[in-house]
Image (tube, rainbow, N blue to C red):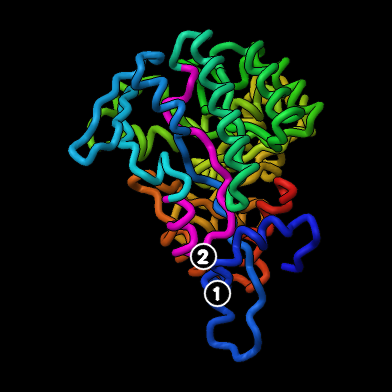
Amino acid sequence: MVLSPNRSRLCLASRSCCSACRFTISGWRARKEPRPFVAIIDFHNHFYPPSYLTAVRNGKSTLKHTTDDDGNPVLYYPGDYNVVVPGHRDVDFRDQVMAEHGISTQVLTFTSPGTHVEAPATAVTLAKQINDDFAEIKASKPRFTALATLPLNDPRASTAELDRAMTQLGFKGVMLFSNVNGTALSDECYWPMYEKANELGAVLYIHPIHPVGVEAMTEYWLMPLLGFVFDTTLAAAKIVFSGVAERFPRITWVLAHLGGTVPYLAERLDRGFYAFEDCRRHIDRPPSEYLKRFYYDTVNFDPKALQCAINFTDISHVLAGSDYPHKIGSLRQMLDSINGLPISDQDRADILGNNTAKLLGL
């Protein structure tokens, strides 16, 4: 990676961990020549701004919440709960953890249960506060950037907040949850929001939330383990089959958790396109042609699964992600799984950071 002037932010963020960053490229470890700097950017991770947690504590939320024995807030939502550990809520703590792992930058995003579980007016207030806090963090802490969050149960307010986040706060895009209290992202109520996103050339990142039918997934943590990835797959399929991806071509779509099952099942969607007239009603090309243009984060730490996604799309569309600090997220496994791929040093560097830097203009 050759650093251009507009990437000086990554240099500043990484000075304290340059040597660690360099050693993540396995092919360079045994060489004697100077090791080039590799910026490692974690696209998929989560943060609760303290002001949001304060609002929940003060009763400005419908969420059930408690505190665990270690003093961590616990937030409950259908099928799951989050223990809000220091990494979820303390930027300085995260800064330390990132330095220890050689991470240059994290792209902060909000997480479950989103603001759309609240009354619409409350959702709007909370989303604005979260985005203001994210904007302040990325302005004051060079190691962080962010994607905005939206009050998705109010489509009109979501359009306005997307516009504000991108034109006034400097975000490159937003995170969308895979369904909004059961309403699909492909629903026409969101098309004005997509028009604005298309106009602005936004990055739209689809992250799962508890799916419809969550009551069938209450055992064995099946909701986050399987329900999440299936709901991402369903959302992506509907975005394509409904014609949304075709109608709004300047939107860049990113899918969490390696796209759910998209790389594995895209061929089945193509068969549906050829077999069923309804699957051709809004598109004139097989679904895989659209899905190959999407981006996929690496939150599936099996190198064989990562290779499946690379084979489906392209190295340039795969983004390093850790799911930090969730219990099944891991910065170390993110790095180890990418380093375990049988790919060139340049391709590895692209997945680790170059692709995200290019996508978000870092």
| Residue 331 on image: x %, y % | 44, 57
Residue 212 drawn above or below residue 233: above
Q: Nearer the viewer, residue 11 or 359?
A: 11
| Residue 257 on image: x %, y % | 49, 44
**Is residue 156 visible from the viewing direction of this image?**
yes
The residue at 52%/29% (across/down) is: 234
> What range is drawn magenta here?
93-116
Q: Residue furthest bottom?
A: 32
| Residue 316 on image: x %, y % | 69, 56
Label 2 amino acid?
Answer: Gly
- Which corner quadrant of the image does residue 210 belong to? top left
Spatial CA span between label 1 and label 2? 8 Å
Q: Which residue is mark 1?
A: 19
Indicate the secondary structure of the residue bearing disc 1.
helix
Q: Which residue is mark 2?
A: 102
Residue 10 drawn above or below residue 62: below
- Which corner quadrant of the image does residue 266 belong to? top right
Q: Are marks 1 and 2 in contact (CB under 8 Å)?
A: yes
